[in-house]
Image (cartoon, rainbow, N blue to C red):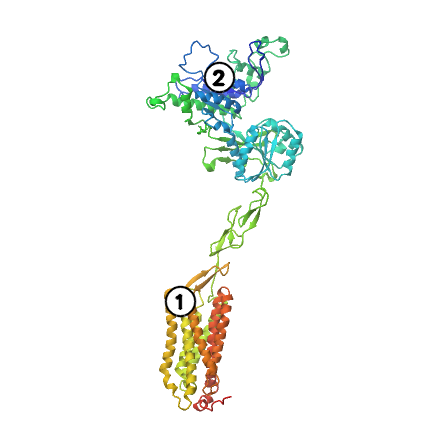
Amino acid sequence: MLGGIFEISSTTILPDLSFRSKPDQWRCEGFDVSVFQTAQTMAFAIEEINKDSTLLPNLTLGYRLYDNCVKLPLALRAATTLIGGMEDVIINYDCEGLPPVVAIVGDPVSTHSIAISRMLGLFGMPLVSFYATCSCLSNKQEFPSFFRTIPSDAFQVKVIVEIIKHYGWTWVGIIASEDDYGQYAVRTFHEEVTKYACVAFSETLPKVKQKNKVSQIINTIKQSTAKVIVVFSSGVDLNALFDEVVSQNITGRQWIGSEAWSTGSILINKEKIGSFAGTLGIAIRRGAIPELQNYLLKVRPDFDPKNSLSVQFWESMFDCKFQDNMQEQNSSTWSGVKACTGFEDLPSKSTGYSDVSQLRDSYNVYKAVYALAHALHSLVSCETGKGPFKNHNCANVRNTQPWQLLHYLKKVNFTNHLGERIAFDENGDVLGIYDIINWQQGDDGIVTIKNVGVFDKSALASQELYLDENEIFWNFDQRKVPESVCSKSCEPGTRKATRKGQPVCCFDCIPCADGEISTDIDSIECLPCQPEFWSNHGRNQCIMKEIEFLSYEDSMGLTLTTTALTGVCLSLGILSIFIHYRHTPVVKANNSELSFLLLASLTLCFFCALCFIGQPTNLSCMLRHVMFGISFVLCISCILVKTIVVIMAFKAALPGNNLMKWFGVPQQRGTVFFFTLIQSVICIVWLSTAPPVPNKNTKIQSVKIIFECDVGSLTGFSCLLGYIGFLAGISFILAFLARNLPDSFNEAKFITFSMLIFCAVWITFIPAYISSPGKYTVAVEIFAILASSFGVLFAIFLPKCYIILIKPEKNNKKALMGKPATKK
């Protein structure tokens, strides 16, 4: 036997409790024929199971159904009657055999289920509710034998939050009734939605109609920028608010309804549809139960005193009274009331009782009965010696106890004819599933509730929420999904900056700084690009920086290359002239070999400038500095030796002086070689310890990569330059001191001038080198090399070329041996 407790009658008449006479039974009135469908569904499911040869074969189920009359005392009385069998005459106190019932389906009210479960839990008797949604009932320590086939309120809130997330609504309002249902839902909703969105306003709807409070809520709705409003309330409590919304013609709001009112017929009518069309709601899973309608229409009144519900149903359905019931009271009370015959045409009545198009509560009852049946089936299918109880025993079918059925009910797992999986989690909650419904108005003006989706917790995480977007009606312009945000999303390339004193959903979008990007919508920070990358114009992508170096294709590089090659040609040209006129006095004077070597070194100086142009490589970086250092030292060494030769030649012309024999050609060559060898040693040590290498410099310019040669060792580079400067300084000083020697022998003034140019160029080079950005740094270095080389070339050799080519008459020994300059 299975018990059932349903909420069929809406009012009760209390008995006289004056303690002067035996109190009468509680009387229930206001029989709801639509709700009676749920009780009949339980009877139908049991009969269907009894006819099924595969489920519980050779075992017949029975049922006992009670009406709680929406009163807790009656609900408790029904429960105690079911578990104790108090209506039966007790002959002895033998407790063996089957209990009156092994499980109870119900109670639909959470408060009733709490009270009943506390009692049934002591006996381990399963209570499977089809409508009690309080989350507190998930506490297995308090309610160990409670199960339900309807999701809890917490799950309903989760579904609503998932819909809000699906459409990107981050700015929502909340309205809740002033009761436990509404206030608990609001608290849970706040906890869940704040992980994703913000609450624009939260209003409480009073249970007792208060015009001022309703007006306040209406003003809040009108002033708020939130377009989405979530409502947790019953339909009765919402009537006054919805009437005011319609009265003030408030439109452009997307309403989301909880399961308590989203399918309530009391709110769905033509007058309200203008403001509330397109409402999305959460509804108990609708199911189709074949042959249920035929079963419902076959009901006939049963005058068995133990089955009074069918008589009450018949009288309420046809608004009549059976003769026996009339006689129980004064006949004058029933004057004008027609008598029931029991043969009225039930199929001709179109009521909620026979309507099976919206089977929601009844479908939950159907699932509850089948869950118990499958648990019983597992119990009777137990193999001897493999049972779950003590000593691996199985339950005795003829003496089945509720706590044994409870063990199997926890493990129920089957798929019904709709393809829905029925199972309970560790809290006794069924696998959550809700229908998503949409209020729509047909062409004939009739308002319909249309299923547009489903939320199934048993599905994959990414497939829990399904919405048929093409079937949803949006009551907005162009019938598009509304937008409800405090601030529009920040596009890639910007970041969110929260407004002071406002919710986190209200923010400004700040463009990313140069060199930073954001690739996601609503980024909270901009990420810096890697050193070799830079942000694009939209600040949403890092692009490779432009690599800059002085190339041959560059106009500046081409100009410097041409200038360097010109210097090479001039040096070689002058060298060829000197070689051709090597026997003339001008060339032979002051050691022609040094002049040839000086011109060769100048050629190398011009050539080394070319090493600074082009993409840096390991070879070019080492070659440019080595060639620069050695060629310039060779050049300065030749100039220094020539200066010394000029001074010694003048001193040797004095009587009794024989200095030139100590500084002949071998000594001059040795001096040049020695000075150059020192620079070569410096270069070798530098290259072997920390050689120059190519380096991509990302610090000088933010938008470009400067491809340059890193000197490696600053000490080595400083020694190289310092040694050149040291030799140039000595040459300048000696030449300057020898500037007043007789004109005929005086090459020192030209050397002085060339060294003056050389030193001036390299002194001005230092600040220019430091302050020049990018490739211009290399250009300044090349310019210094070329300028100093041209200065030496022109200052020393141009006067001699002038004599050789333009004034050949002066190119003789007599002219060179002219009178010495007089001393001042």
Kindly identify which residue carries mark 2.
Answer: 80
The image quadrant that residue 260 belongs to is top right
Q: Where, quadrant-wise, is the N terminus in this rendering?
A: top left
Identify the element where label 2 is drawn. Answer: helix
What amino acid is at disc 2? Thr
Pinpoint residue 689: horizontal percent, then vertical percent.
Answer: 37, 65
- The answer to whether residue 157 is above or below residue 721 is above
Question: Can residue 231 be seen?
Answer: yes
The image quadrant that residue 380 belongs to is top left
Identify the element where label 1 is drawn. Answer: helix
Counting residues from the N terminus, which is met first, the one under dot 1 or under dot 2?
2
Which residue appears at 38% of the width and 78% of the height?
672
Which residue appears at 37% of the width and 69% of the height?
684
For the residues labelled 1 and 2, the Cα–Cα distance comes to 101 Å
What amino acid is at disc 1? Met
229 vs 691, nearest the viewer: 691
Pinpoint residue 175: horizontal percent, then vertical percent.
Answer: 59, 33
Left or right of residue 177: residue 421: left
Kindly identify which residue carries mark 1.
Answer: 622
- The answer to whether residue 379 is above or below residue 584 is above
Task: Name the disc covering residue 41, or none.
Answer: none
Could you classify mark 1 by the number of other residues whose Cα lies within 10 Å: few (under 14), some (14-19), or many (20 or more)? many
814 vs 564, nearest the viewer: 814
